[in-house]
Amino acid sequence: MALFRIARRTRLAPAETWRRLTDWERHGDSVPLTRVTVHTPPPSGTGTVLVARTGLGPLGFDDRMEITRWQPPTGAGPGVCRLEKRGRTVTGWAEIEVGRAGAGSYVVWREDLRVRGLPRALDGLTARTGRVVFGRAVKALLRDRTP
């Protein structure tokens, strides 16, 4: 199992943190050689389907995902978004949790990333790579963009 976890804190309010982390198209700006498209009409919620295309030209793969849990954060508790990866190449799941932490919020990103055809002996490398790539993506998505 190529399971990894990313934890971050931000000064952003939980609602803004949630908005940024679930702006799916922006994920493509944060992950190298990746473009994300949403295949269902807005707004995002349970049943939303998105595809992350990673590669150059015809060389690449699709990471097809469906949101199976959509619970935005409220004053009463954290929010959770669960995505099931249903592609031919990439499988597994990802869960994004956002909750209040003092004046800001916390993020916990958990993911079980599987690449078909990759031996289980490489799960550790896959998890470390996922932690680095998605850790950078979370950092970029939460970055303050004010001048």
Image (cartoon, helix red, strand yellow):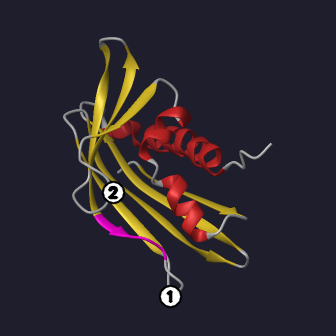
Q: Which quadrant would residue 103 be assigned to in this image?
A: bottom right
Q: Is residue 62 left or right of residue 146?
A: left
Q: Which quadrant would residue 95 be assigned to in this image?
A: bottom left
The circle drawn on residue 43 is 2
* Residue at horizontal 45 percent and vertical 59 percent from the top: 110
Residue 61, compared with residue 112, is above or below; it is above
The circle drawn on residue 76 is 1
* Residue at horizontal 26 percent and vertical 63 percent from the top: 46
Foreground disc of the pair 2, 1: 2
| Residue 7, x across and y down, in percent | 60, 61
Circle 1 SS class: loop
- Direction right: furthest residue: 147
Assess whether residue 70 is covered by the magenta stretch.
Answer: yes
* Residue at horizontal 72 percent and vertical 79 percent from the top: 102
The amino acid beneath tag 2 is Pro
Q: Quadrant of the C terminus?
A: top right
Disc 2 crowd rating (10 Å Cα; few below 14, some 14-19, many 20+) is few
